[in-house]
Amino acid sequence: MIKEFLKLVILGDIFGAFWIGVKNCFRKPVTKNLLNINRSEKFREIVTINKDKCIKCRLCENICPNLSIRLNPGEFPIWNKEKCCYCRLCRKICPKQAIITKEHYNNSNEE
């Protein structure tokens, strides 16, 4: 009886997984195809810091994985675009929403 139960469970799981795979092969994809978006090779975002809203709490500097935001004592945050990986963690953690990101398409070397 235990052998029959294990056979049923194991074969049921195998065939169940197989059936889900076959069924999903013929469905429309849920995800969007991002390869067809017309973006420049030099695509970057522009990160700006609203100095009126900034309270110099240093949260953006502490969460930045690439250390692209620096805050000298008594000054506003300075963003280094060469180091930035555009993860937007600084924007998400800012309590006053002082960090603004905008998509920027750049077709030249000037920024």
Image (tube, rainbow, N blue to C red):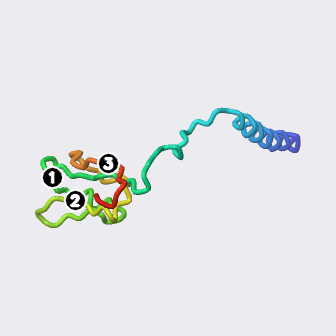
**Residue 36 drawn above or below residue 55:** above
Label 2 residue SS: loop
**Residue 1 drawn above or below residue 71:** above
Residue bearing mark 3 = 92
Three-letter amino acid code at the position of disc 2: Arg
User: Residue 90 location, x and y as percent?
Assistant: 30, 54
Three-letter amino acid code at the position of disc 3: Lys
Residue at the spot x=20%, y=59% of the render? Answer: 77
Residue bearing mark 2 = 58
User: Residue 68 location, x and y as percent?
Assistant: 30, 64
Residue at the spot x=33%, y=61% of the render? Answer: 109
Residue bearing mark 1 = 55
Depth order, front residue of 19/11:
19
User: Residue 15 location, x and y as percent?
Assistant: 80, 39
Q: Label 1 crowding class (10 Å Cα cut-off): few <14, some 14-19, many 20+?
A: few
Measure the alpha-carbon separation of dots 2 and 3. 13 Å
Residue furthest toward the front? 108
